[in-house]
Image (cartoon, rainbow, N blue to C red):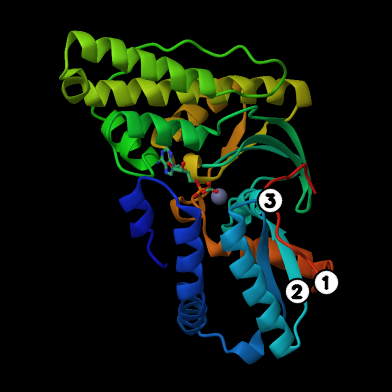
């Protein structure tokens, strides 16, 4: 995998830096993937690419490369929705959920409860109205002086702490989420505490991380339980970068035991963004000859099910 060091340096993803990195890396990364997989270009049956949602500049690079590769090898093109691919990452391993299931898809840009009736039949039944769960982790981490992305670091630090501090839970109708209030509550809390004790963050870092993590996990699971009850579904899955969070994984497991759910969490390498999940989504579309034209243009936002 081409590394993300530049994003760490800037404390976030700078779109232009990301596009330039894609241009520089796409050919060597594809070459390396083919050689590591022991696959020759002539053995390929179709080219799947991420059409969106995401950063447009990076999507343009991937889409253009996929078209050029498909044209030059006379292969069909398959467009893949990034969020749908996160859900389908479950089918990379043998212990996949059975249909219908609910999937809480939590990443840096999205927080969605998805009802999945078949590989390519999905409906978003709840989503965030503002920040995504991963964004809440990353923004809280920034306030705490942690690097980007902060989710994994908060997860690690939280293991040594206790959730001693409480933040108010948002009141959001239906199955939707909101994380912007939590972000503000953490900001004011840290501001007030550091006024009294300038070393407050340093001295309480593990407990603050455990508290932030617990708040996010509690918000996420409450709506998931409501969704499961409403839908009458007990096959419950997690997906997306935040599903790598150990607090979320263990809280899901204990809630699952209480609620009589069968729970599914992807292997770590299939939680955060990865090419395998795009390949899997492409595979199911290939089986249905669900190809796209060479006029397919990337999109920055949007996924209302497929
Ligand atoms: O799915 P993903 O790799 O990229 C997007 O599609 O956005 O998700 C990235 C997000 C980041 O916000 C990152 O902080 C978060 O996933 N993340 C975590 C953990 N690992 C990654 N958040 C909490 N705990 C983790 N262990
Ligand atoms: Zn993602």
Element assignment for label 2: strand
Q: Position of residue 293 (x, y in %)?
A: 83, 71
Element assignment for label 3: helix
Q: Nearer the viewer, mark 1 or mark 3?
A: 1
The disc, 1 or 2, on the residue closer to the chain's N-terminal end is 2
Element assignment for label 1: loop
**Residue at x 32% of width, y 26% of height:** 209
Q: Position of residue 75 (x, y in %)?
A: 75, 83
Q: Nearer the viewer, mark 1 or mark 2?
A: 1
How far apart are the two marked residues, 1 and 2, measured between alpha carbons?
A: 7 Å
- Residue of label 2: 77
* Rendered image: mark on residue 84: 3
* Rendered image: mark on residue 293: 1
Res. 161 in view: no
Q: Across the whole image, how many numbered discs are drawn on residues?
A: 3
Marks 2 and 3 close (CB-CB < 8 Å): no
For label 2, the crowd category at 10 Å Cα-Cα, with few meaning under 14, some 14 to 19 and many 20 or more, is: many
**Residue at x 45% of width, y 23% of height:** 183
């Amino acid at each position: 995998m081409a590394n993300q060091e530049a994003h760490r340096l800037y404390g976030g993803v700078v779109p232009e830096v990301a596009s330039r990195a894609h241009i520089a890396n796409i050919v060597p990364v594809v070459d390396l993937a083919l050689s590591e997989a022991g696959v020759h270009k002539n053995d390929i049956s179709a080219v799947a690419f991420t059409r969106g949602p995401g950063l447009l500049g990076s999507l343009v690079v991937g889409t253009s490369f996929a078209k050029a590769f498909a044209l030059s090898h006379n292969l069909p093109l398959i467009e893949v929705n990034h969020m749908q691919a996160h859900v389908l990452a479950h089918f990379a391993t043998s212990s996949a959920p059975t249909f219908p299931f609910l999937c809480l898809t939590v990443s840096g840009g999205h927080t969605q409860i998805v009802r999945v009736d078949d590989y390519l039949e999905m409906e978003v039944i709840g989503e965030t109205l503002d920040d995504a769960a991963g964004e809440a982790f990353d923004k809280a981490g920034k306030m705490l002086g942690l690097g980007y992305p902060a989710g994994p670091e908060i997860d690690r630090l939280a293991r040594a702490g206790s959730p001693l501090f409480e933040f108010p839970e948002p009141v959001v109708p239906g199955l939707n989420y909101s994380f912007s209030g939590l972000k503000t509550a953490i900001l004011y809390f840290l501001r007030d505490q550091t006024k009294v004790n300038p070393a407050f963050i340093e001295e309480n870092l593990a407990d603050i991380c455990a508290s932030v993590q617990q708040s996010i996990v509690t918000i996420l699971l409450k709506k998931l339980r409501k969704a499961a009850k409403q839908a009458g579904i007990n096959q419950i899955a997690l997906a997306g970068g935040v599903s790598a969070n150990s607090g979320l994984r263990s809280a899901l497991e204990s809630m699952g035991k209480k609620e009589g759910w069968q729970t599914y969490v992807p292997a770590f390498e299939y939680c955060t963004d990865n090419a395998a999940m795009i390949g899997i989504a492409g595979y199911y579309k290939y089986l249905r000859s669900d190809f796209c034209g060479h006029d397919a243009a990337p999109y920055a936002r949007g996924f209302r099910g497929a």
